[in-house]
Image (cartoon, rainbow, N blue to C red):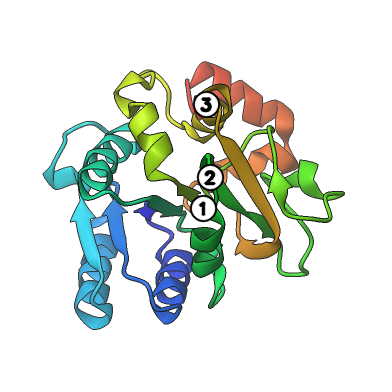
Amino acid sequence: MPVKDSLETAEQAIRAIVKSGHTLRVYDDYSSAENAARLDTLRGELEIEVVHVSEQVDHPSPNYRWVLNEVQREVIAKGQDLIIVESDVIVGKETIDKLIVESRKSKIGMVAAVTVNEAGKVNFPYEYAKKIKEDGACKKRFSFCCTLLTNAFLKAYSFEQLDPEKNWYDVHISHMSVKLGFENILQVSNPVLHKPHSSRPWKQLKYTNPLLYYWRKLTQHRDKI
């Protein structure tokens, strides 16, 4: 789980994973000193692993590419899959188990849980899935909100190839999975609660003031996908 401040939401996300019976590694991507300290407290309380990216690299946040490369090397060496749950996503008790079961089918590249709001309605970034009624293969973009990447796919595509000039890679990686002949499965029967952009509130402008959002995106070179 990558974390960048927004500790109230992130702590909910962390506790939900621990409650579901799974271990967790948190990558703290330059949170404030206060929030980094809180993560260390949670490490002791919940027996999670915390990696402070600032102790490893001096590149400013976001450091998604560095994190992806680190974990890819590790899980390939261990013969494991990679599950990413973002810090604004609250999983259910069986969410992760259902991703794992689906991933055991042949030629699967990625398995993602659809995201919903607190009213249970499909929300960003899976608005295109509002009319999808059954789990199944999907060639549209996937997010890393709550997504499993299989070991087979990870061995087929090196994250060293990711463009270092960009910030986010979920859309590109999900398209590469399909391009390499894997199936990406979207589980609409396995929803997770998504609180979009809680760690980067300026991105809420995309919905409240899209002209200002895209102006900042262009002039400040932010949010490069």
Q: Earlier in the sequence, mark 1 or mark 3?
A: 1
Let me know if residue 41 appears in the view.
yes
Q: Identify the element where label 3 is drawn.
A: helix
The mark found on residue 172 in the picture is 3
Point out residue 113 in the picture as x, y percentages from the top left corner. Answer: 61, 56
Q: Which residue is mark 2?
A: 106
Residue at (45% x, 58% y) in the render: 87
- Asked if residue 127 is positioned above or below residue 115 in the image, the reply reads above
The mark found on residue 10 in the picture is none
Q: Which residue is mark 1?
A: 103
Task: Please state which of residues 11 and 31 is positioned toward the viewer in this rendering.
Answer: 11
- Asked if residue 188 is positioned above or below residue 22 in the image, the reply reads above
Q: Nearer the viewer, mark 1 or mark 3?
A: 1
Specify the farthest residue to the left.
Answer: 55
Tag 1: residue type? Ser
Tag 2: residue type? Ser
Q: Identify the element where label 2 is drawn.
A: loop
Tag 3: residue type? His
Q: In the visual, does 73 lie left or right of 55?
A: right
Disc 3 to disc 2, C-alpha distance: 22 Å
Figure quadrant of residue 38? bottom left
Disc 2 to disc 1, C-alpha distance: 8 Å
Say whether marks 3 and 2 touch (CB < 8 Å).
no
Task: Please state which of residues 78 and 125 is positioned toward the viewer in this rendering.
Answer: 78
Residue at (42% x, 29% y) in the render: 167
Q: In the visual, does 40 lie left or right of 131?
A: left
Figure quadrant of residue 77? top left
